[in-house]
Amino acid sequence: MSNPGNQPDLRDLPPEGVQELLVSLGEKPFRARQVLRWLYLGGARNFGEMTDLSKNLRARLAEAARLTDLEPAEVHTAADGTRKLLYNLEDGARIEGVLIPEEDHHTLCVSSQVGCRMGCKFCRTGSLGFTRGLRPAEIVGQVLAARRLADEARPLTNLVFMGMGEPLDNLDHLLLALGHILGEYGLQMSQRRVTVSTVGLADRLADLGAGTPAALAVSLNASNDALRSRLMPVNRRFSLATLKAALLAYPLKPTRRITLEYVLLGGVNDRPEQALELATWCRGLKCKVNLIPFNPHEGAGFQAPDEATVLAFQRVLLDNNLTALFRRSRGAEIGAACGQLAARATAEDDEDPED
Ligand code: SAH
Ligand code: SF4
């Protein structure tokens, strides 16, 4: 038998790769369709589950390839039903996701990396440092596991890449995983309901836009370069002007808008004049703003703003003809910190009937 370490994980391959592998095993190309169906819509956890393949083919597949099967090692449930899912990966790395129940569906907050190297000052993941990017199989594996936890009345329909990591810092794997999530041979999820959230790696935005029709969210969090560079070191590489130019060039469908996420940090970026500066920066961009009250965590050194401050900030944006949403946080008591708050606002807002 071949060394298991060298076997490709079928969910790390694009559909053509799965087809090539089957052809190399002496199968007809059409067999790939059947296997791909098991990999994604069928959510097969091992080759044995692919029951309409011959036993012989299943055995040969198990020799030639492997399947990563993610199962949460721990699930913490908050009073409002929000679940934090912790996964142990095969190399001992740990990642988390958050599964958020809504009235008629679930939203999953997906991780793209183990840790993050962007080092944003207010972010818990940023303070953990960086280990590695996730493989496509580990990204889509989170979605498959969460589908099993969702229920028929509230299926998993919405994804936001707002868990651990910076998706554009793992772009090739992200795009492959998005193919598995959105594609004809994959889970066929709706492109309007899958959102990639990025800190704004301006030099990768064009490749993202060319590589996927998924929705885009950008974490802005400050309205001028001095403050943004202090909070988000990435701004020293890509200034707000550079970021805006990249966003203006982003290929958006006519009815779609970019979501701008703005984490409100008490006394730091939450003043009305900063809201005005933000509104000015937004001019000309097809965008909407999600206001996210800071979710405190140990050692962060920031505070959540009070609600009146948030509402005053929102008012300035609305008065300047921007769409600006603010929703209260969920799941905070299980440490479902950071991204999922943004997650909820973004996912719920995408119900515009236009497309
Ligand atoms: N790296 C990507 C996606 C993961 S972070 C990004 O930065 O966009 C997802 C969202 O969570 C970002 O908008 C980020 O600004 C926000 N966030 C991080 N820490 C937070 C905290 N403690 N409270 C509220 N939002 C937070
Ligand atoms: Fe990374 Fe996003 Fe956290 Fe910044 S906010 S450190 S980019 S996960």
Image (tube, rainbow, N blue to C red):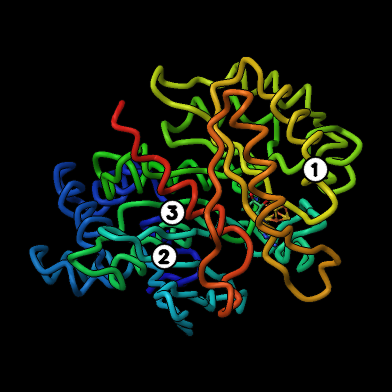
Q: Position of residue 79 (x, y in %)?
A: 44, 81
- The kind of residue tagged 2 is Ile
Q: Quadrant of the C terminus?
A: top left
Quarter where residue 179 is shown: top left
Quarter where residue 145 is shown: bottom left
Q: Which numbered mark, 3 or 1, is in the foreground of this view?
A: 1
Q: Is residue 150 left or right of residue 237?
A: left
Q: Are marks 3 and 2 in contact (CB under 8 Å)?
A: no
Q: Earlier in the sequence, mark 2 or mark 1?
A: 2
Residue 271, which numbered label? 1
Q: Under 8 Å from ligand 1: the CB of mark 1?
A: no
Find the distance from the CA under tag 3 to the CA under tag 2.
27 Å
Task: Give the secondary structure at mark 3.
Answer: helix
Q: Under 8 Å from ligand 1: the CB of mark 2?
A: no
Q: Is residue 282 left or right of residue 158?
A: right
Q: Position of residue 68 (x, y in %)?
A: 41, 68
As displayed, is residue 166 above or below residue 151? Answer: above
Q: Quadrant of the N terminus?
A: bottom left
As displayed, is residue 126 above or below residue 218? Answer: below
Residue that badge 2 annotates: 100
User: Who's the residue at 20% across and 74% down the image?
Assistant: 48
